[in-house]
Amino acid sequence: MDSAALAAGELTTTLPLDLRFPWVAPADIATIAAVRMLSPAWSGRVTQGVHGPVDLSFSDVAAVLGRVLGRTVTARRVGENDVATPLRGSGLSEKQVDGILGMARGMQSGFSYENARSLLTTTSTTLAAWAQEHLTTE
């Protein structure tokens, strides 16, 4: 999330605003990884899907963030260059920028998750709870 744009009431993305996907809290990813690595049953390589509690579009996310922040947040679709330029400006290499943009391109072209949403892959932290903890000063 671009904090400067969000402070200005805008959530930007190169993705279609109605494309839904699982938004997951970083702490939930860390918890799943730690539990997996600390388990005596774990060895080798394992793919573990991690999905937030619901799939959300950028329009949904803007609405949730607006409610939590108490102001209007609008989702706006932008071109790849609008995303690439600030990434380069923050010091990312061309390969890193292309990797980030490539993930967005992949999401738009029929991407399917290796691990589908299930009881095992679904985490509990909502976007609203994450935003309340990390984006507000209360």
Image: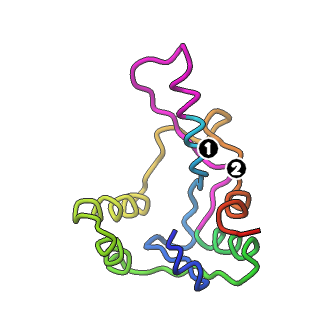
Q: Residue at x 43, y 52 (%)?
A: 111
Query: Is residue 124 on the magenta stretch?
Result: no
Point out which mark residue 73 bears: none
Name which residue lies at 59% across and 81% down. 7
Residue 32: x, y in percent?
Answer: 58, 35
The secondary element bearing badge 1 is classed as: helix
Closest to the observer, 84 or 77: 84
Which residue shows up at 50% across the image and 73% down it?
2
Q: Position of residue 64 (x, y in %)?
A: 71, 69
Identify the image quadrant of the C terminus: bottom right
Callout 2: 10 Å neighbours few (<14), some, many (20+)? some
Q: Tell me where the magenta segment starts and ends, as one range.
A: 33-57
Name the residue beneath numbered marker 2.
125
Q: Pointers 1 and 2 in contact (CB under 8 A)?
A: yes
Q: Amino acid at mark 2?
A: Thr
Q: Main secondary structure of the magenta part?
A: loop
User: Residue 72: horizontal and vertical position, in percent?
Assistant: 69, 84
Q: In terms of secondary structure, where does tag 2 sit?
A: loop
Residue identified by numbered label 1:
28
* Residue 86 pos. (x, y %): 35, 76
